[in-house]
Image: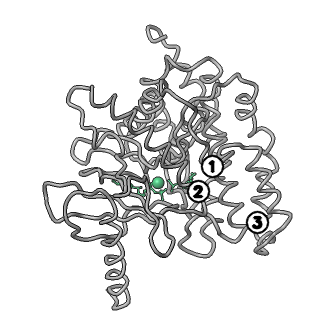
């Protein structure tokens, strides 16, 4: 460790201790460290000195991505309260591990703004968990699917007004493409000369990628409560039993189509490579992982879905992976303002990895459709 790293750690720790005492936390601050690999917030694990008390996750909230903290925190609070009530009734359940728990500030707010204007929020740390960036077994995929299906099913009877739209048009393919073409014409970072092949890839598919969104507008696919960021590492597993625990990162829980969640999960669970893999030969969609995830997911939700939803489930991973590539590419053309990056061309590398995955999915699309049909309509399971 360099001296400068130590100084940074001490400064972090000092700041974190000051923030820690602003919230209704139990226990004494022991230490705070950067945690996880999320692309959006600055996340810290704060451990308490007492071994029998909870540890905490503190996040410096990204106000560039989420313009309205109140909307985000109100949604999360409503959703987690609803889930907790249901989970508490299940025999042998562990509510503090099976859903996020929001910790309010001592002023009874769901967030805190420090003297420099940074916005902070806190959750109970879910202990003894593990999460995966890459999935290597059908059991994990099945469990992940079960957790997302259970999440959607449990929220299907949430009372009250609709949840806030925390990022408008988050999964609106038409809007994402519009923004992309806008940036293409502006070329703010002078990178258009580098991305010609990727732009041709987008042009070729743009129209068909709006299909699911359009079915939503026509009312053929219903709006439900969805998570909207079901990247596999947002699902936590029990470190010892391997059982799925819960899905975290609830900033984008809002009205949506189930396809967004199914597609985004498959984009990450069934990819044989990393989201940003530089060696494209390592990237394929693993059809067995697709099947296992779909099986877990449908075991919780298939009785709720209508025929059109089922019919388009297999197409969703192609759309979401394509749009994710478009989002990375848009950020690259824009000069990297949205996603955290580790090196200069990181967003382009991510784009190429996503587009390679799209091609692999396109080749296996028929098989994906057959699998969904078999899982839903097989004898005795209608
Ligand atoms: P981002 O939006 O930046 O991805 P997340 O809310 O997903 O932020 O948090 C980043 C990471 O921190 C997660 O991937 C997970 O590893 C960890 N994390 C977040 N909340 C908790 C929690 N309550 N308990 C345990 N780990 C958590
Ligand atoms: C971001 O927050 P995180 O890292 O789980 C992004 C998702 C993308 C994902 C790509 C609010 O997710 O939409 O799919 O990166 N979240 C937001 O890795 O934009
Ligand atoms: Mg995350």
Q: Is residue 242 left or right of residue 349?
A: left
Residue 194: which quarter of the image? bottom right
Q: Are marks 1 and 2 in contact (CB under 8 Å)?
A: yes
Rendered location of residue 331, percent (x, y): 68, 64
Q: Quadrant of residue 305?
A: top right
| Image position, residue 35 (x, y; %) | 36, 64
| Residue shown at 57% from the left, 57% from the top | 281
Q: Horizontally, is 90 left or right of 292 in the view?
A: left
- For residue 155, which numbered disc appears in the image? none
* Front: mark 3 or 1: 1
Q: Residue furthest front?
A: 107
Return the x and y of residue 158 as percentages of the image width and height: 48, 28
The yes-or-no answer for disc 2 within 8 Å of ligand 2 is yes
Residue that badge 2 annotates = 66
User: Who is closer to the viewer here, 272 or 191?
Assistant: 191
- At 77% from the left and 51% from the top, the residue drawn is 202
Regarding residue 367, the answer to whether it shows in the image is no
Quadrant position of residue 365: top right
- What residue is shown with label 1? 167
Disc nearer the start of the sequence (3/2): 2
The correct choice, above or below, for 189 with respect to 171 in the image is below
In the displayed image of the protein, which residue is found farthest to the top? Answer: 380
Disc 3 element:
loop
- Local crowd size for mark 3, using a 10 Å CA cut-off: few (<14), some (14–19), many (≥20): some
- Dot 1 falls on a residue whose secondary structure is loop
Kind of element beneath mark 2:
loop
In the image, 173 versus 346, the foreground residue is 173
The residue under label 3 is: 195
Residue 378 visible within the image: yes
Q: Is residue 373 above or below residue 105?
A: above
The residue sitting at 47% across, 46% down in the picture is: 250
Asked whether mark 1 and ligand 2 are closer than 8 Å, the reply comes as: yes
């Amino acid at each position: 460790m360099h001296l400068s790293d130590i100084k940074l750690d001490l400064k972090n720790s000092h700041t974190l201790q000051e923030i820690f005492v602003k919230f209704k936390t139990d226990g004494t601050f022991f230490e705070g460290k950067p945690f996880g690999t999320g692309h959006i917030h600055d996340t810290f694990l704060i451990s308490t000195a007492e071994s029998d008390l909870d540890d905490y996750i503190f996040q410096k909230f990204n106000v560039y991505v989420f313009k309205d903290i109140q909307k985000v925190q109100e949604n999360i609070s409503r959703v987690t309260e609803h889930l907790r009530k249901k989970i508490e009734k299940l025999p042998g359940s562990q509510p503090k591990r099976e859903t996020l728990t929001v910790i309010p500030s001592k002023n009874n707010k769901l967030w805190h703004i420090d003297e420099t204007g940074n916005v902070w929020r806190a959750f109970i740390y879910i202990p003894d968990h593990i999460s995966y960036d890459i999935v290597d077994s059908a059991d994990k995929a099945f469990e992940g699917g079960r957790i997302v299906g259970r999440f959607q099913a449990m929220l299907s009877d949430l009372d009250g007004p609709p949840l806030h739209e925390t990022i408008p048009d988050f999964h609106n393919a038409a809007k994402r493409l519009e923004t992309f073409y806008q940036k293409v014409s502006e070329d703010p970072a002078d990178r258009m000369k580098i991305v010609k092949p990727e732009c041709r890839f987008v042009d070729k598919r743009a129209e068909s990628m709006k299909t699911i969104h359009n079915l939503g507008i026509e009312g053929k696919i219903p709006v439900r409560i969805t998570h909207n960021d079901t990247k596999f590492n947002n699902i936590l597993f029990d470190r010892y039993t391997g059982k799925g625990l819960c899905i975290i990162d609830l900033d984008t829980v809002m009205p949506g189509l189930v396809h967004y969640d199914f597609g985004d999960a498959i984009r990450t669970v069934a990819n044989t490579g990393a989201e940003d893999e530089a060696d494209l030969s390592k990237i394929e969609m693993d059809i067995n992982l697709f099947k296992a995830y779909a099986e877990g997911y449908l075991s919780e939700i298939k009785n709720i879905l209508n025929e059109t939803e089922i019919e388009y489930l297999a197409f969703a991973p192609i759309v979401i992976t394509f749009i994710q590539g478009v989002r990375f590419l848009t950020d690259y053309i824009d000069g990297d303002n949205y996603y955290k990056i580790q090196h200069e061309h990181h967003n382009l590398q991510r784009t190429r990895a996503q587009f390679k995955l799209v091609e692999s999915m396109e080749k296996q699309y028929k098989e994906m459709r057959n699998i969904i049909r078999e899982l839903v309509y097989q004898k005795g399971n209608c």
